[in-house]
Image (cartoon, rainbow, N blue to C red):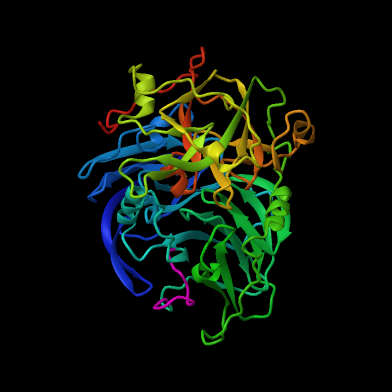
Amino acid sequence: AAIKKYQFDVQVRNVSRLCHAKPIVTVNGMFPGPTIYAREGDRVIINVTNHAQYNMSIHWHGIKQFRNGWADGPAYITQCPIQTGSAYTYDFNVTGQRGTLWWHAHILWLRATVYGALVIMPKPGTPFPFPQPYSEVNLLLGEWWNNDIEALVKQGNSRGLPPNMSDAHTINGKPGPLFPCSEKHTFAMEVESGKTYLLRIINAALNDELFFAIAGHDMTVVEIDAVYTKPFTTQALLIAPGQTTNVLVQANQAPNRYFMAARPFMDAPLPVDKQMATGILQYKGVPNTVLPSLPQLPASNDTAFALSYNKKLRSLNTPQFPVNVPLKVDRNLFYTIGLGRNPCLTCVNGTRLTGSLNNISFVMPNIGLLQAHYSKIKGVFRTDFPDRPSTPFNYTSAPLTANLGTSQGTRLSKLAFNSTVELVLQDTNLLTVESHPFHLHGYNFFVVGSGIGNFDPAKDPANYNLIDPPERNTVGVPTGGWTAIRFRADNPGVWFMHCHLELHTGWGLKMAFVVEDGEGPDQSVLPPPKDLPPC
Ligand code: C2O
């Protein structure tokens, strides 16, 4: 194992896209930010120095951070922000994981421009469990706003309305030639006929689940969220914010130029093509003047495609990469996902959009929850988050009023060390048509079941996949449906769980787990690092 060191200078830089120039927050002046490379077993040390006028924290999305929440990054959950002019060193081990993850700012909406890939290669001498690619490429899907995003968010919050949609989607920070002034802001990858390429695809968008396809080329999915899957071939893939997907692509078509494209699933009130990002797959030797053709993407409301795509995702489940899904459950949790309107005195129309779990909208504390837990500081949070809704209702056909009267609080759920947990996330969302990508920090979980309508505890568990369920860190809960996940609470600390749509997180669609220390010598939270940012 090696030690990999990185210096991240958070700094503002002028960037122009879509004929608009504006200052954006970057790492080392790069947009997207630098890629972190490590091997399974390595220790990674990243010094983050904040030169920007915004307070900062960075999350290493998908890294388990065993006993080491201090390096996890979400502001006010595991640390206080790194103030302007200050620095903090994230120091963590990459244990038992290999594949594609990513990192992003975890405060306000700053992750719109502060994000990058985190690539974990297998241990030396351990090949991929699929054909060795000739070469590999990172594809970070993102969003671009012409206006200042933080200002939009502020304005939106005071009006009780969401901020504007983004002006474009992007591939590696570039919207592609379908947008004005964007010829030179087009991502292109060159391929050689007959060779196989590994694409590491990351959805870093703030608010959109995305379809992705390459004209004329099939993709073979081999890994999701840094866990190998049973390979399957598809023309298009679906990826939610927070998720990663590795695919193999063979350059086996007529030498030409082909568009790759990404556009939203479901939730775009504007014509979706208005936001479609394109990039180019270009065979070596083909002149740049050849006009590429666009890929076929599923229709923006193609729920059937989404359901069948997600069903195909299965863990590899081999002796080398076994599936350790808990078969016996110690603790059954059932959380409703709600979006509604709550009274708001300072808002223009008297109400504010609110996101809640079990009708509780999460209130961010003023100091890090992990510090409060570790140092036993009283009065920062409560541990009475309910295991299920206080009054059950018909979740998927109840009138919207069931989502009104949401209460607010910094309420956490306490889990016993090493207990096995099943969590059913039940959508009750009647306000918009989109699925909610839920991300759990500190863990991977197994997605054992999913369905449309109300979860039925008497029937649905019989259909769970306990053999080769996908293992991941972010899962899409379908619109008007449910998803069941299982995990073993073997990582002590305070771990955030939230919808990875930034809009919904901001409205309070989030909570956290406190996983207690175990009795053993290596079963408690490590002491905090000396340079942990003060509040
Ligand atoms: Cu990728 Cu809590 O986030």
Q: Is residue 349 visible?
A: yes
**Numbered range of the magenta stretch:** 173-182
Farthest top residue in view: 519
In the image, residue 497 above or below residue 387: below
Query: Between residues 309 and 334, which one lies in front from this camera angle?
Result: 334
Q: Is residue 94 visible?
A: no
Relative image position of residue 43 (x, y in whole percent):
44, 38
Query: Between residues 346 and 439, which one lies in front from this camera angle?
Result: 346
Relative image position of residue 18 (x, y in whole percent):
38, 73
In the image, residue 180 above or below residue 359: below
Q: Is residue 265 magenta?
A: no
Q: Quadrant of residue 483?
A: top right
Relative image position of residue 392 (x, y in whole percent):
62, 29
Query: Between residues 128 and 323, which one lies in front from this camera angle?
Result: 323
Farthest left residue in view: 85
Count of numbered marks: 0
Q: Quadrant of residue 400?
A: top right
Which residue occupies 59% across, 54% down?
239
Query: Between residues 334 and 64, which one lies in front from this camera angle?
Result: 334
Q: Main secondary structure of the magenta part?
A: loop
Q: Is residue 181 magenta?
A: yes
Which residue occupies 68% across, 73% down?
216
Q: Quadrant of residue 227?
A: top right
* Rendered-image quadrant of the C terminus: top left
Relative image position of residue 477 (x, y in whole percent):
61, 44
